[in-house]
Image (spheres, grey):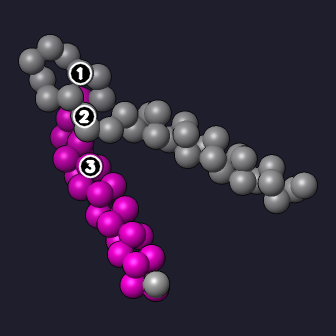
Amino acid sequence: MVQFIMGVLIGITVTISAALWADAGRAPVCPPGAGCPIVNWDEAHDRYERFREQIGLGERR
């Protein structure tokens, strides 16, 4: 079971790292003819902040 959990965590980390590495040289806005980013990092950051806020609210209850 521990190996499964570690595998999932490592898989998530590798996937996020690969997307970040692939998007590093791309513009955040997708102009015509250019490579679009794989991930909308602004949206990902907003969702992460909302998640942290919800976790924080749960701890205070």
Q: Which residue position is annotated with label 2? A: 37
Q: Earlier in the sequence, mark 1 or mark 2?
A: 1
Q: Secondary structure at mark 2?
A: loop
Residue 30 circle label: 1
- Residue at image position (12%, 23%) is 34
Relative to residue 54, is residue 2 drawn left or right?
Answer: left
Judge the density around disc 1: few (<14), some (14-19), many (≥20) Cα neighbours within 10 Å: few
Task: Identify residue type, mark 3.
Answer: Ala
- Dot label at residue 19: 3
Give the SS element for disc 1. loop
Q: Amino acid at mark 2?
A: Pro
Q: Is residue 58 left or right of residue 26?
A: right
Which residue range is magenta in the image?
Answer: 2-27
Are the residues flagged by discs 1 and 2 in contact, CB closer than 8 Å? yes
Q: Nearer the viewer, residue 29 or 4?
A: 4
**Residue 50: x and y, percent?**
64, 41
